[in-house]
Amino acid sequence: MAAPADVASAARSGEPGVSHSAMSGQEPPLIACHECDAIYRREPIARGAKATCKRCGALLYRGLPDSLDRSLALYLASLVLLIIANTFPFLALKVGGIVEQDHVIGGGLALVDFGMAELGLVVFLTSIAFPFITIAGTLYLLIASRLDVVAPGMRLTYRVVNALGSWSLIGVFLLGTLIAIVKLKDLATVVPGPGLFALFALVVVYAAARTGFDPEVVWRPLRLRRLTEADLPSAGQLLHCHSCGLLNRGTQHPHPQCARCHAPLHPRLANSVQRTWALMAAAVVMLIPANLLPVMTFKKLGQGEPSTILGGVVHLVEDGAWGLGLIVFFASVAVPVAKLISLGMLLRSFRSGATWRPKDRTALYRATEMIGAWSMIDVFLVALLAGLVSLGLVASIEPGLGVTFFGAAVILTMFAAHSFDPRLIWDHADLAGQSGDPVPTAVDPSR
Ligand SMILES: [Zn+2]
Ligand SMILES: [Zn+2]
């Protein structure tokens, strides 16, 4: 792990001349940590290495020299796999002479049939539409960069792709599918189709595509001159773009825009604290019916009781599927509650002007944001089961109203985590730094 040289103190006080390479002509551009706003020189690092923030530990960038062709290949493969996963049969159920086939889209459609169009739309968007837009959009930007042309609409495409990335939940969908297969194995023979194998491959290839993607390569055709240390004395209060990561000069404009992707710039996310509290309160309200109302009714030979989220966990454990029962418990019960508690704690610590352990609190925020989407497992599970199991008198699965409330709660907690600005944690920590607490050192002497 290589940490780039830190010029945070120079950026704050406006002192020029920190860098020994300042006069070399090939000055590295400046970047800001998106979680704590510390400023660094973006120096080249070894292939496969990671540059992390010395102050908060966030990943700044990876060593990905010449990643363009590899990214192109991986995103193209992801697109092909996504199309195969969605056009070929995905799962089939066999009971006696009855065979039921289903496609990936079947789960969302089944929810619509049961009068839950909103939830069906959420399932369709997160498992098919958003992944497609993200992958195809990134591919478009990569091809333009390879041809060295400024693609029409590239700024909007980048902002859309960047915003939808965290809502593309194919990995969560796959895990939901595996749990559905285990749940159905006593009822019928489950036959995986080509769509399922493509989905497996897609999850692996897409993960590799995302880690190997350097967003900087898509901006190359713009030939934009980036801020360096030499610009600091005249740059004013620097503004970090949340969308593309460009460090922008300070401006007097009331609604400043990023010079590269044209996203609106804010020193801090607007009304972050109030908005996060409001979204959390709404999520708590949704979680109550989500846990009290049944999420589905499983009928076998005309017999069956509606079951709640916890009931479903108990059912998995009784069936001997301990591991999956634990996964569903963590994803559906523990994660939403832990998320609300940790966000509440972060907000309270900000309100009280807390200065303690900012690095750990940032790490807590990072974990909160990352795990949230996995709670969607239960929503996908119910959708898949409802889509697959309609074997007339033999068996049927009907989604319950609880799953709609649960889906709403999960989405609200995800919005809440996105609306919290982790840099707030460091605003108080910085003030404390002036009275003797640790602040980042000026230049890493090892470089
Ligand atoms: Zn940081
Ligand atoms: Zn930008």
Image: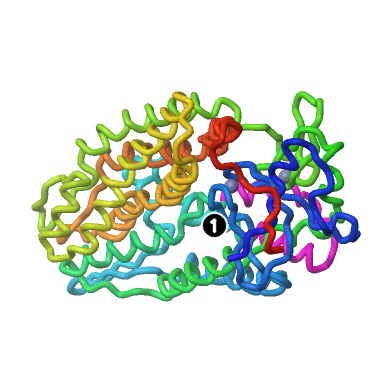
Q: Main secondary structure of the magenta part?
A: helix
- At a point 83% along the width and 67% down the height, the residue shown is 147
User: Which of the 4 image quadrants contains residue 193?
Assistant: bottom left
Seen from the viewer's position, the closer of residues 131 and 194 is: 131
In-image side of 284 versus 22 (left or right): left
In this rendering, position of residue 250 left or right of residue 379 = right
Q: Position of residue 122 (x, y in %)?
A: 44, 45
Does the rendering let one see residue 121?
A: no
Could you tell me the amino acid type at mark 1? Pro
Q: Residues within 10 Å of mark 1 (few under 14, many from 20)?
A: many
Residue 160 visible in the displayed image: yes
Residue 124: x and y in percent read: 46, 51
Number of numbered discs: 1
Which residue occupies the foreground of this view, 65 or 402? Answer: 65
Colouring convention used in this rendered image of the protein:
rainbow
Q: Is residue 198 above or below residue 277?
A: below
Q: Is residue 145 magenta?
A: yes
Q: Which residues are magenta?
A: 136-164
Q: Is residue 1 above or below residue 343?
A: below
Q: Residue at x 46, y 30 (%)?
A: 354
- Residue 409, magenta (yes or no): no
Residue shown at the point (43%, 34%) measured from the top left: 346
Provide the residue designation for mark 1. Answer: 131
Identify the residue shown where x is 70% and y is 56%: 5
